[in-house]
Amino acid sequence: MIATRTPFRITLGGGGTDLPSFYEKHGGFVLAMGIDKYMYVVVNIPHADRLVRLHYTKSETVAHAKELQHELAREALLRHGIHDAIEIASVADLPAGTGLGSSSCYLVGLLTAIRAYTLNPASLETLAEEACEIELDILSKPIGKQDQYMAVYGGLTSLEIGRNGKVSTTPLILSEQEMSDFVSNTHLYYTHTQRDTTAILAEQSQSIRQEPRGVVENSLLEIRDIGYEIADALRCRNFDRFGELMHKHWLAKRKLSSKVTVPVVEEFYEQVRAEYGVLGGKVAGAGGGGFWMLYCPKNGNRLMNFMSSQGLSRLHYSPEMEGSRVIANVLKSYSGHFHGLQRKGARI
């Protein structure tokens, strides 16, 4: 058995500028942070048969990996020449569709496990680009590159994305106390709404490609610039400025799609800004549900109690400075069996 642990992430600035439709024209910039909520993927090798068993919200049992309905698992296995005789299970600390990068966490966690199984390690950049290639190129998903890179790198990390798609990663270093102060003021609340971002992101990409400097493209240019300002504010330890820029970001993000906002957010946002000292907020990910982030430098307990009274409980989290990694590997004792299968020409 091999088990991997991959952190979810929260986007702090520049979200949406990692879409190919945007960065190929202007270059992108994203600042995000890995958090201590994880996707766990477990890979095991059966000994009684050569079937492929996959357990997620559904269960699949097939004779060949190409028969899998789960696109990410199918393409990850086929990419590494694994066709049968494998069992994969996954569990997560948070639900899917909540804007914290769960799909890419699953893929990166599975690729990490597969590479440990096949004794084929890779650099962080290679692993991230492999996940990007599967999701963006092979499966043609209308998503960007931040989720894959943050799943691999973790930490408080900025992603500078060139027009050619090349991603440069830079850690933003805060002391333990500074990070604690920042996180304590940055609340996450679950809206109890899950969504598929495909429609939202596809709409944005289509708008950028079809409209000459339309509302969406101009809004993303503004969001990218705000992302740079947010990174500067954190480098200067001006966390309240981060909160103010979050509000500015939210106003720009609302222009991207009518699907970005959700009623529960619209209902309470101006109220918490006026009555609880919230400086800014945003819906995590592409919007449409999931987690609501609020920056509240004062009255944090009052805000938390109010949100709880409205049925929105706070998600407590800490930063996770590592990306995807193997946390258990007891297949080493079967390495002889594994290499023997290779020598006999068996499919793996």
Image (cartoon, rainbow, N blue to C red):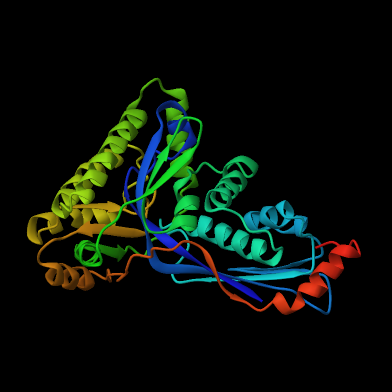
Residue 316, compared with residue 268, is above or below; it is below
Image side of residue 60 versus residue 270, left or right: right
**Which quarter of the image is occupied by the N terminus?**
bottom right
State the image coordinates of residue 15 (x, y, percent, origin top left): 36, 44
Image side of residue 71 versus residue 32, left or right: right
Q: How many numbered markers are drawn?
A: 0
Quick one: 192 or 39, which is closer to the camera?
A: 39
Residue 153, compared with residue 207, is above or below; it is below
Which residue corresponds to the image point at 60% horizontal and 44% vertical from the top-left?
133
Which residue corresponds to the image point at 81% horizontal and 78% vertical from the top-left?
47
Residue 119, compared with residue 141, is above or below; it is below
Quick one: 297 or 116, which is closer to the camera?
A: 116
Which residue corresponds to the image point at 50% horizontal and 37% vertical from the top-left?
166
Residue 178 visible = yes
State the image coordinates of residue 252 (x, y, percent, origin top left): 26, 38
**Which quarter of the image is occupied by the C terminus?**
bottom right
State the image coordinates of residue 249 (x, y, percent, origin top left): 25, 43
Which residue corresponds to the image point at 15% horizontal and 51% vertical from the top-left?
238
